[in-house]
Image (cartoon, rainbow, N blue to C red):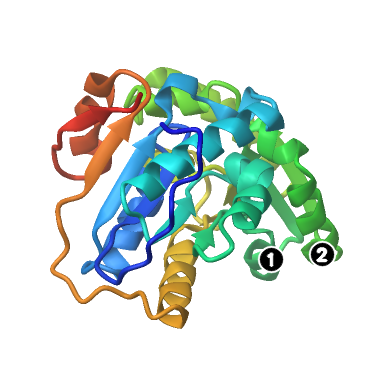
Amino acid sequence: MASDAPIVNLRREAPIGVFDSGVGGLSVLGEIRALLPQESLLYVADSGHVPYGEKSPAFICERSQRIAEFLIAQGAKALVLACNTATAAAISQLRERYPELPIIGMEPAVKPAAAATRSGVVGVLATTGTLKSAKFAALLDRFANDVRVITQPCPGLVEQIEAGELHSEKTRQLLRGWVQPLLAQNCDTLILGCTHYPFIKPLLAELLPANVSLIDTGAAVARQLQRVLDEHQLLATGPARPAQFHSSGQCQRLEQVLPQLWGSAAVVTELG
């Protein structure tokens, strides 16, 4: 990756660049594909540095900047930070550096969860980095005045999902230990505050009562991307080119889980 910022060249048929610390952003990529099937997609998994949740904000900013430069150099017309932790740490700097480039981020769905709860108790499953961020604190101040929010860090869960362990007994035991205290406090709405976590919705559904709602923001991010591209007259007309995948970790590991998490196989290129 070059140290100098690449030139942004916005074209309708250019691809959308999406990145995450690992495979979690594939949940967002899938929502983008479903809503905007005519768009070509580039995906970067920074799996050589996963998980971001335990890293410093300065480190996450540096990684986000390097990946943004790579995606822009590949011709991306927009960036999606498909990672709550990266959004909290880096999106402001990226928007300042590339003011002409549409940049969409993630945030835990505090507002819709506060509106959905009937018991008045909302649980949040997230990484340590997201829960410690100023952005998350601001969301609570803005939208959670009338509800009780219980936060639950989930160390080790990202690694389980990265390994494709979506139904294993270890993953089940980890989740059980995290959700039981929330249920004991009458939580009826659960925010999935990391883009990895939608992949374990089926397992969560086995562990939670039917009256507990699961809320994530992947579909909302896809809709926001659609609105912003439309405003910039950048919506593609298609046809889309096959999605391209890159990883800073072991490419073979991402290739192994793509059929499970993306729905089809693909070649993964190493990110230098």
Residue type marked 1: Lys
Closer to us: 172 or 46: 46
Q: How many marks?
A: 2
Labelled pair 1, 2 in contact (Cβ < 8 Å): yes
66 lies above or below 113: above
Relative horizontal placement of residue 170, taking residue 184 as reference (left or right)? left
Mark 2 belongs to which amino acid? Arg
Figure quadrant of the C terminus: top left
Question: Crowdedness of circle 2 by 10 Å Cα count: few (<14), some, many (20+)?
Answer: few
Query: Is residue 201 visible in this depiction of the protein?
Result: no
Q: In 3D space, how far apart are the residues under numbered discs 1 and 2 (Cα atoms)?
A: 8 Å
Q: Earlier in the sequence, mark 1 or mark 2?
A: 1
The image's mark for residue 111 is: 1
- Tell me if mark 1 has few (under 14), some (14-19) or many (20+) residues whose alpha carbon lies within 10 angstroms of its own: few
Q: Position of residue 160 (x, y in %)?
A: 42, 23
Looking at the rendered image, the quarter that the N terminus falls into is: top left
What residue would you read off at disc 2?
142
Looking at the rendered structure, the secondary structure element under dot 1 is: helix
